[in-house]
Amino acid sequence: MDTPDVNMADPGNISIHVEDLKVETGSEEEMDDYGSTDESSIDDNHHVSQGLPTRSLPTGLCYDERMRYHAEVSALSAEAVHPEDPRRIYYIFKELCEAGLVVAKGYSLMVDQPLLRIDAREATRDEIELVHTAEHYDFVRRTADMSNGDLIDLSESPAMDSIYFNRLSYYSGKLSAGGAIETCKAVMERKVKNAIAVIRPPGHHAEVHQTMGFCLFNNTCIASRVCQETFGPACRKILILDWDVHHGNGCQKAFYEDPNILYISLHVHQGGNFYPSGPEGGMDRCGAGAGEGYNVNIPWESKGMGDGDYMYAFQHVVMPIANAFDPDFVIVSAGFDAAAGDELGGCNVTPPCYAHMTHMLMSLAKGKVAVCLEGGYNFRAISRSALAVTRTLMGEPPDRLEATSATPSAVKVIEDVKKIQSRYWKCVYPKAPVSGMYGGERLHDILRAYQAQHLYDKYKLTELYIYREKISKSFNKQVLATLGYENKKHLIIFFHDPPDIISNQNPLTSQQKPHDSWVLDSSQAYIETAVKQDIGVIDINIPEHITITNDRAIDENRLHYNTSVEYNSHTTDIARQEAGKLAEYLWENYIEPYDFDGGIWLVGAGNAFHAAAKLLSDNDNVYHRLKGVIAFICQSPIRPISNPNNAWVSSWYKDHSRIFVAQDHHVWQKAEADGKKISKRYGRLIHSKETILNQMLLHHLPDVFDFIHETGIFVQPGTMDLAFEGDPDATDEGEDELQMPGITLSSPPQLRPGTATSQQALSPQRGGQAMSRGTSQQGQTVSPRAAAAMTRGENVHGQSMSPGQFYGGTRIAGRGDSVRMQTPPVMKEGHGGRSETEPRMS
């Protein structure tokens, strides 16, 4: 049988339960006389003159120690108590008293106009059911009659999402909701100019039909509905600003289709992996039906967000949208778990930042602002933060902010949010791009197609095909290589980010004029230098976003098929795993089968270096084939190289790497502050005076090739043996020797078993007979494909060659005609390795 819904404010009704509480509190002396006083509290006879200026009104404070009755039954000590600790509100109230803002016994008053106390009361069933279902209300009410054992079992039940109960939880929950109601009504009635409600248990996670995340009833939602019903048109539009570090899923769902409640939440999201988890807190959740556009999520990609990030969000999203909405009333769901020092939140918001956010919100709704406590679990952090907010509400200017610059991660999130919200708010720019509306294409694909053409025309780079289905299709056309790279003595494997695009964007339309746009790609300088020095190159462009098609990866990461994931995501490494698969595939199929006797160098620029680092860490067969590793790091993390099965890898990496790191990278500040040497796992770090990736690449190009020549096997300067087939009628005594400045072209190369040089021109008369037997002119065996090609007078890639053409089709000198490539080669599927090519000839 259900328990009658009685008013439990009568001490006689609660005395039998108080002895069950097992929570450590402050001393009894500290807690005496914390009740409201006759001189500074609102009663039924309190009236405000209609002509009284708003600024002369006091700020209100709602606090009731009976809300502390909600506590864990099983908590026996301070060390074992739940994070949502009853002492949270006590320490906030104590901080306000010590600051001299409250009339309280034992504390000196330090302001002319103290906080006006607002008495809390229990919310009624009708008020609570303006938001919650009757079943939800009855469930919470029944906990008042349960035994301690049953309450413990209920709290530990898998069906309970981060919730605990005792027999007074129902009572405290109603007091918390009632305190929020009375606080909001006092502001709307202009009994106070604004107010803060130090209440618990919190409420913004409580959904319409269930308790959740420390929350029993949704306090701010209930107060919003009560105010709308009580004050009618004077309180039709309400802004709920939620700065708790967790997404207020309960608030969002309660008003998702309501155009009169604008809900804005700033929270850590981590791709849906931060509590309350799931996609609901994503920036694409904008409301539904009539409420579409009235739900604004600002989801941080990681913890660690600070003052500059929150200020940037307020200036670029929160305040423009809030001003356009023009609310009648503002309620702040004020969780202080984003405060510096809160272990659950892991962010770095300071009390002055909370004060500045409050100050900006006070410019709305003619100053009608009610701040209602939500989360926050570090006693000192919540106390100082709440004090800063209260002082600002009372009219004091906020303290100066120390850190005001937003992080790149925050800027990106805000820009993405703006693009989404620009669909609904005229004041938000830039407007979302219209890709696809007029048959638009992504510029990334266009640029890579141009690069492929350009790199072929200048350096004869052609595509290496990826035949493994489990590797993302985003890497199609992203891997290019110089012709005949497999027969070079030296090889550079270059993983790099896409080119930078610098442009002047129209803020109203998002349009970019080609005349005012520039493509910056310093990687080409490395290709050009390598080609001139007869070094083979495999060029790997790692896109900024990777499309995930692997079924297992999709299931493990709860993604949709063909989901595009940012390569440098702070919340998941699934995109970087795909690049790691690509690197392994390229190594096994295009690099490991060949000798490269002069040396192999692994180069990584920007975020793309992660793929190279993963290859080196995971594959034991890689490092001993390399002459060195080179990387360029601006702001991305420096990837350590280590192998649990081979401790030697880290030491090798320290001796054989050159890691150029931007001068403003945090690693330098951290090393200086800690006074410690940087671990050898990070390689040999070199301090670069540059801060932009493209500039770093150009600035250190001479250093890189000096390192390559120091570590590789090269001929003496001034002479270089080139693989060249001269006049068929010439003698072997050098009659066909060609002279170029600094280069001597002399004897034919020695082929290694199983290969044939792709630069030699073979005539059917001289080479066909040998090739048909599967041997080279030197009597060495070659592959059947190479033999067939050379029998036709072609190289292994199917191209006809002349005596004067070698090294990727560049004519140097000699007798006979050369092949001039007018267009990129037509690709044909090969036999699992590099694709053959057919040139168009003139």
Image (cartoon, rainbow, N blue to C red):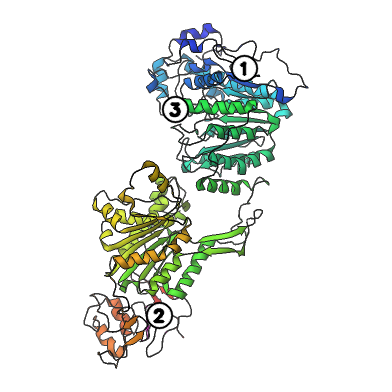
Q: Position of residue 541 (x, y in %)?
A: 43, 62
The three-letter code of the residue at mark 1 reads Arg
Instruction: Give the left or right position of residue 149, taking residue 179 as reference.
Output: left
Q: Position of residue 307 (x, y in %)?
A: 53, 38
- Judged by depth in the image, the label closer to the viewer, 2 or 3, is 2
Is 806 magenta? The answer is yes
Residue drawn at (42%, 67%) of the image: 526
Q: In the image as oriented, which residue stretches furthest toward the left? A: 779
Q: Is residue 208 above or below residue 510?
A: above
The magenta segment: 798-824
**Foreground residue, 112 or 746?**
112
Is 12 magenta? The answer is no
Instruction: Name the residue beneath numbered marker 3.
Output: 160
Q: Are marks 1 and 2 in contact (CB under 8 Å)?
A: no
Cα distance in 3D space between marks 2 and 3: 71 Å
Instruction: Name the residue beneath numbered marker 2.
Output: 809
Q: Are marks 1 and 3 in contact (CB under 8 Å)?
A: no
Q: In the image as oriented, which residue stretches furthest toward the right? A: 51
The three-letter code of the residue at mark 2 reads Gly
Question: Is the residue marked by circle 1 packed among few (<14), some (14-19), or many (20+) residues within 10 Å?
Answer: many
Question: Is the residue marked by circle 3 packed among few (<14), some (14-19), or many (20+) residues within 10 Å?
Answer: some
Q: In the image as oriented, which residue stretches furthest toward the top? A: 12
Instruction: Give the left or right position of residue 638, taking residue 254 as reference.
Output: left
**First along the sequence among labels 1 and 2:** 1
Instruction: Name the residue beneath numbered marker 1.
Output: 117
